[in-house]
Image (cartoon, grey):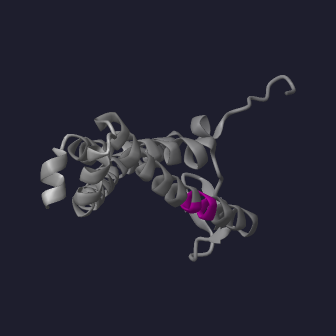
């Protein structure tokens, strides 16, 4: 940089835009926490129904000698594989869609959109490590945590009661 010329980041150049983006991200994280709670309740409910429908079968394998730890492992492995399939397919679809959108751009639809001195006619999304790896991994692990209660219920049901149902 030649003397007398300053180089500024976009955050320094447009602090009001940086504050707006930061506030938007804060709202996004609150929304994601609420959405994650709803999804985890759905996973827990689905797994509880799955366990309840297979009470007889789980009682039989307990009567044949499977330990409670083995039952928990069985239910959690089912959650893991279902979650991996769903999260993997969703992540792959999201990354590919984002790559296509990044190549062609997403028109704002209003011509040149001007905010904080920045003109935007087309937006170009970016795949990040956080959105492509960290969040999907968090969802998978959270889904397994949500399935822990149904797994424990299955593990500690008495075999005789389970086979009677």
Residue 70 left/right relative to 128: left
Residue drawn where x is 63% and y is 41% of the image = 10
Evaluate whether residue 17 shows in this view: no
Residue 92 left/right relative to 87: right
Name of the residue lying farthest toward the right: 2
Q: Nearer the viewer, residue 89 or 93?
A: 89
Q: Nearer the viewer, residue 144 or 1?
A: 144
Evaluate whether residue 139 shows in this view: yes
Examine the structure image and report whether residue 93 is included in the region drawn in magenta: yes
Rendered view: 134 above or below 3: below
Location of residue 5 (image quadrant)? top right
Q: Nearer the viewer, residue 89 or 62?
A: 62
Residue drawn where x is 59% and y is 44% of the image = 133
Name of the residue lying farthest toward the top: 3
Rendered view: 90 above or below 130: below
Main SS of residues in magenta: helix
Q: Position of residue 37 (x, y in %)?
A: 28, 50
- Residue bounds of the magenta highlight: 89-94
Location of residue 71 (image quadrant)? top left
Examine the structure image and report whether residue 49 is included in the region drawn in magenta: no
Residue drawn where x is 85% and y is 27% of the image = 1
Residue drawn where x is 43% and y is 41% of the image = 141
In the picture, which quadrant includes the C terminus? bottom left
Q: Position of residue 47 (x, y in %)?
A: 30, 56
Q: Position of residue 95 (x, y in %)?
A: 64, 58
Q: Position of residue 116 (x, y in %)?
A: 54, 52
């Amino acid at each position: 940089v030649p003397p007398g010329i300053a180089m500024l980041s976009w955050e320094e150049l447009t602090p009001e835009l940086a504050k707006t983006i930061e506030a938007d991200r804060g709202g996004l994280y609150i929304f994601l926490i609420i959405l994650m709670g709803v999804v985890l309740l759905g996973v827990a409910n689905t797994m509880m129904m799955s366990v309840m429908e297979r009470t007889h079968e789980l009682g039989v394998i307990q009567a044949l000698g499977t330990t409670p730890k083995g039952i928990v492992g069985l239910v959690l492995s089912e959650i893991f594989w279902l979650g991996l399939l769903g999260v993997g397919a969703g992540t792959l679809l999201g990354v590919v869609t984002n790559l296509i959108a990044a190549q062609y751009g997403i028109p704002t639809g209003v011509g040149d959109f001007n905010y904080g001195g920045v003109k935007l006619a087309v937006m170009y999304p970016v795949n990040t490590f956080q959105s492509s790896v960290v969040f999907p991994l968090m969802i998978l692990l959270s889904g397994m945590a949500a399935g822990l209660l149904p797994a424990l219920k299955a593990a500690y049901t008495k075999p005789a009661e389970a086979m009677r149902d």
